[in-house]
Image: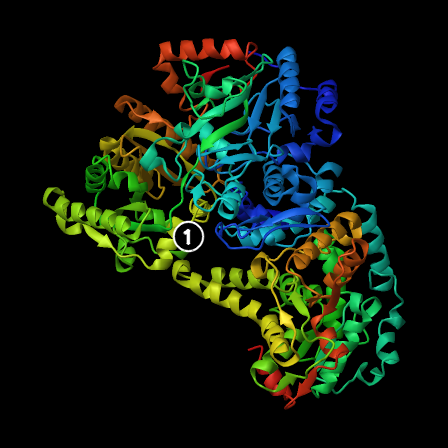
Amino acid sequence: MSYKLPDEKDLEAMIGIVGKDYATSNKAITASYLAKSVMGLESQIPDIVIRPKYVEEIRKILIYCSQEKIAVSPISAGLSGGFACPTIKPGGVMLDLSRMDRIIEIDEENRYAIIEPGVTNGALWAYMAKNHPDWAPPIPDGAPPAATVMGDAIDRGFSLYTSSVGPQGDNFMCGEIVFPNGDVVRTGSWALPFAKPFYKYGLGPDMWSFLMGSQGSMGVITKAAVKIYPHPKHKTVVVWGMDNPYDMQDLTLEVAKQEFGISHNTVMVQGGNYPLVMARWPKDKIPHEYEFYKELGISQWWMNWECWAQTAEELDYVTKRIDKMAEDFKKRAKSPDAIVKQVLHPKQIASRMKKPNKIAIPYSFWEAGFLFITWYTPWNECAHFAEMYTKAMEKYGFPPVIWIASIERCRQAICMPIVCFDSTKQSDFEKVQTLNQETTEYALKQGWLNYRPDPYIHIQAYYQAGMYWKYLRAFKKLVDPNFIMHPGRLALP
Amino acid sequence: MERLKELEKDVYRCIHCKACRFAYSGEPDRKGIGEFTGKQGTVLYEGMVDACPAGIEHGWEAFWNAGKIWIARSILSGDLEFTDEVRDVIMPCITCGQCSAQCENKVRTVDIIEALRAACKEAGVPMIERHQLVERLTKELNNPYGGKAEERFKWAKDAGLEKFIDNKDAKVGYFVGCTASYRQIDIAIATCKIFEQLGIDFTLVGDEVCCGSPFFRVGAVDTAQELMNKNLEAFKGLELAFFSCAGCYKTFTNDYPKWMEGDGLPFKTMHAFELVSRLITAEKIKFKPSKELKGKVVTYHDPCHLGRHMALEMEQKIIEESKNLMMDSRKIRQVINDWYEIPRIVLRQLEQDVGIKFTEMYRIKLDSFCCGAGGGVRAGYSEFSLRTSSLRLDEANAIGADIITTECPFCWRNLSDANEEYKHGLTVYGLLEMIDTFKLLEVIEQPTLKEILKMKE
């Protein structure tokens, strides 16, 4: 597939749509949109950046670019840990949607918020804390405050309520999408002109899911209705430690398999290993030996259950049930003596419950750069994944940092190795890519899925799913006839 | 380019997370004062609040801090060359350091932006015209205001303070700075009178020239170094230099040791407000009641150069020296808290003795919002600079302040100009200026030189 490199005439056309203040080919400005870290190492300076504000502007831009065969990459609000898809080859136009930052409606009775793509986690959280304090949006835990709610949705990411209610994509009810063929489509009940966005599957086959995981390769989502949930005052974090990932996996599964009651109260269930603590500090200014962390009361592996409840009694019941199940689990554990409850200081609890937070940011402090290489596995295979990946990271000289979280009461695991490396060194870049390639080959053989596909390495997954890819391409052809949306993503041209 | 290369690891530590665009980026639940509509629009002062002036003004990614760091990375990797376009996005940054304060990876953003500007100039891209003019004036007259050298201390002569000019016996100098010498002379006079009342034998150094701060900030490092060398020669032999300007203080204390030959400054440095604060703690001074000030709501604006830049330098020093940063991180928080307490000790004493009502704005201390004057922006982009200052004054209006105090003549100037331009209805004072204007100081016991020097150990 070949694309046109946009020229002065194209820039003039874009200026004609959004005005001279919101379209540019200024090299300094376009270079500022690079992002070779956190979620992917591929990033290309776009040729033109546009900052539209209205749906009609986006429609005109897409129609124009489709006619001219100019590639378009949309991003929700600049670059952040919550946004994974900067422009890649062949460049083209980047749509920076940060001006579309309206919180349009909060409906406490039907429990949804309608937002535009540029609404950041920080902005929505502050707005709701002030105006709707009994409710909270499902913003991601770990994605920084400047990441957007919408960006996380399209990634199907992990959020505040994911462990309890399911993948982040499922938290979205209805959306409004502009396709490059010029159509503006509303999904779910929103397809009807006077309907509220109250039902995702309203008019038969669900089109919203078509957008989930699309990484901007289908169209531009301009509005979405996201579920909101109670934000009760009774909250805490329960942590149990262990010395191996298998005990972490099995104990967590036992709690989650309750399905009702306590497993719904455990809104966020996430854990990992002690290098998660270690690698947040500069490599040469922190002890590497486990003994130091042991002295601090940190287990080699642990699991956090963040518990939310409507009353103090309910919270007390939940925490005691988890503790009892952990005690009982010792009888079946690989390493019973290592199963210990970690007592947290109130400040530690407060820090873990803070949303949005900056918890995922400091891994660059270890050296100068890091990459999340994230996978989905069935929950009862996450320990196998962790074992495989920690060995691979150590083989390549990287600290074996692993974070694992439950999705929908341990129906799936989201497994995230954090590769901390020195991005000033080309040799380190190459090592990361080799590690990624090697582990991808292994992981695909196990039937595991990459969460946020790297356009070059994880393309292997699509080679193994030929029929699915055939239909994906056919759907794309329908809405994006000239294949202009984010070419290269998802193995699509 | 050499300095930018030295900062390469810092540049590459930026992951483009953009937490740096907010004040209180780590405090999403911080209780605020709600929404306020001021002269520059409506701001929700709850949780994290956008706080990068250039980003707020321009919106494009390149103007927010993270965008600039990725411009620096593109330059280092050869993906981008220095051009007028690059200059025009890296210059409208006030270098307030808000971004650096928010960064979990401790990226030295201000150092990077200053190094980027210096490398841009070195690559042959001319400075913007206003900065060229300021540089020409300073090279000719040793100050950026076009004031005559012989008139630098005219205010002292007019105020009956002539005896302190080139007072050869003194071991303590007062570096007045260009803004207080040629523009905000009330601040210079107030500082001298307070020293006089405290019985400090000090000197105004006749050969004092611009500290070089504007030139370190905009990348004209050669000019800055020339000025630095003149000042080091002029202040030779003194044991302590006092300052009333945040920018001059920061430049002497933080920048000179990085650019000069030898092992650090041959004298100690102290901002005058720190002396006042320490004397309150030592119970050597207190304040007198004032009918005019009683009941007035007084707030305090932390100057970036005095607050954040000094605090972050302290943090970097602890990081550099640390063997186990996890254990030393508490020390960092303590040192920074202690530093920000210094002006607040003065304000709380004023509340107790004078009867003012000291009320903080929403964004304070490490998260304080800038006045808009620094980084060459007041000289280069005056309208943007004043709009930023007005945004800060909106925050003072939001808490019902009558008076906004600060401890920097440059902040004072910009806040005053915005106060007038946008009709905020506030009164702007330097903290020491307010103390002198209302004759508030009551000396219980004059400090000795030894005691003063001990304060900086």
> Looking at the figure, which quarter contains the N terminus of chain A?
top right
Q: Across the whole image, how many numbered discs are drawn on residues?
A: 1
The residue type indicated by label 1 comes to Trp
Picture coordinates of residue A345, whole percent (x, y):
33, 59
Q: Residue at x 38, y 49 (%)?
A: A353
**A462 lies above or below A396:** above
Chain ID at mark 1:
A
Q: Residue at x 42, y 23 (%)?
A: A199
Residue that sits furthest to the left in the current view: A331
Seen from the viewer's position, the closer of residues A469 and B321 is A469
Horizontal side, residue B250 vs residue A88: left or right: right
Horizontal side, residue B206 vs residue A162: left or right: right
Horizontal side, residue B403 vs residue A84: left or right: right
Q: Secondary structure at mark 1?
A: loop
Q: Quadrant of residue A343?
A: bottom left
Picture coordinates of residue B27, whole percent (x, y):
49, 52
Seen from the viewer's position, the closer of residues B454 and B256 is B454
Q: Residue at x 44, y 34 (%)?
A: A111
Picture coordinates of residue B273, whole percent (x, y):
66, 74
**A16 lies above or below A157:** above
The local crowd at label 1, few if under 14, some if 14 to 19, many if 20 or more residues have their Cα within 10 Å, is: many
Q: Quadrant of residue A418?
A: top left
Question: Is residue A415 visible to us here?
Answer: no
Way the structure is coloured = rainbow
Seen from the viewer's position, the closer of residues A377 and A228 is A228
| Residue underneath mark 1 | A281
Residue that sits furthest to the bottom in the current view: B445
Question: Is residue B450 visible to us here?
Answer: yes
